Amino acid sequence: MNRFGTMRQAQVGTEVLSEFMRGVYGWMSAGLMLTAAAAIYTASSPAMIQAIFGNSILLIVLLVAEVGLVFAISGAINRLSATTATGLFLLYSVLNGVTLSSIFLVYSMAAIYKAFLTAGGMFGAMSIYGYVTKKDLSSWGSFLFMGLIGVVIAMVVNMFLRSPGLDFVISGVGVLVFVGLTAYDTQRLRYMAATAPMGDATVMRRGAIMGALQLYLDFINLFLMLLSLFGGRRQ
C-alpha cells in the first residue's frame, strides 16, 4: 500500500472511532436524561412513591429487573439486534430512575446538585484521560475489579453494622474505584472501536450501546458515592 493509501486508511479509522465514541456518549446521555426524568417524575408523585417504596415486594421486583436487564444486555449483546439492545438499555435507564427517585426523599436538592456537578466534572476529566492517554490501562482492570468487589461486600456488611465511619470509607474508596473504571472503560472502548469491522453498522451500534451502558453505570455509581460522601441528608 502506498503512502496515500495508508493515510486514507488512517483517516477512515479516525472517522469510525469518532463516530463510535459519539454514539457511546450520545446513548449514555440519553440514558441519563431518561433516568433523571423518571426519578423526578416518580419523586413528585406521592402515589408512586407509596406504591414503590411502601411495597417491598414491588421494589425488589424492580431491582431484580434492573440487574436482569444489565446481565441480558451484557451477556447477549452479540445476539441482540441493535434495536432490541437499544430498547433494553433505555428501559433499564427508566427503571433505574424510578428506583433512584428515593434520593430526593433522603438528600437535599443542594446536595444532589453538588454531587451531580462534581461527578460530571470527574467523569469528564477521567474519560478524556482514558481516551487520549498513551499509557496502557489494562493493568488497572484486576485492581479495580477487586476494589469493586470489596466495596460491594463492605456495603452489605454495613447494612447490618450501620457504621457512619465505615460508610464514609466505603464512599471514598468507591469514588476512587469508579473514577478509575471511567478511564479504564473509555480506553477499552476506544481499542474496541479501533479493532471493530469497518462499515458494519450493526456491530458498531451494538458496541455503542454496550459502551453507553458501561459508562452510564460508572457515572451513576460515581454520583451515588459522591452523594453519600458529601452527605446533606434531609433532617
Image (tube, grey):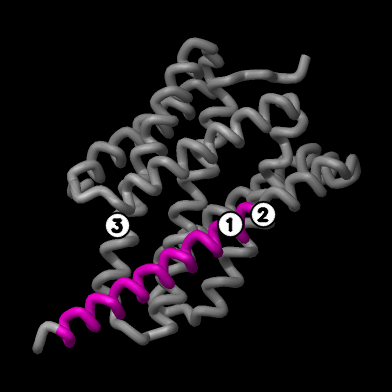
Q: CA distance from mark 1 to mark 3?
A: 19 Å
Q: Is residue 51 above or below residue 147?
A: below
Question: Which quarter of the figure has residue 169?
Answer: top left
Mark 3 or mark 2: whose residue is earlier in sequence: 2
Contact? badges 2 and 1 (CB < 8 Å): yes
Name the main secondary structure of what is drawn in magenta.
helix
Residue assigned mark 2: 33
Contact? badges 3 and 2 (CB < 8 Å): no
Residue 123 lies left or right of residue 235; in this view the side is left
Task: Give the SS element for disc 3.
Answer: helix
Contact? badges 1 and 3 (CB < 8 Å): no
Q: Which residues are magenta?
A: 4-32
Residue assigned mark 1: 29
Amino acid under label 3? Arg
Q: CA distance from mark 2 to mark 1?
A: 6 Å
Residue 202 lies left or right of residue 192; in this view the side is right
Residue 125, given in percent of the width and then of the height, sits at: 42, 41
Question: Which quarter of the figure has residue 79?
Answer: bottom left
Q: Residue at x 29, y 57 (%)?
A: 188
Q: Residue at x 72, y 25 (%)?
A: 110
Q: Is residue 163 visible?
A: yes
Q: Is residue 5 magenta?
A: yes
1 or 140: nearer the viewer: 1
* Residue extending farthest front: 4
Task: Give the SS element for disc 2.
Answer: helix
59 or 109: nearer the viewer: 109
Q: Is residue 170 above or below residue 26?
A: above
Residue assigned mark 3: 188
Please state, as top left, top right, bottom left or bottom right, where the N terminus lies in the image.
bottom left
Please state, as top left, top right, bottom left or bottom right, where the C terminus lies in the image.
top right
Amino acid under label 2? Met
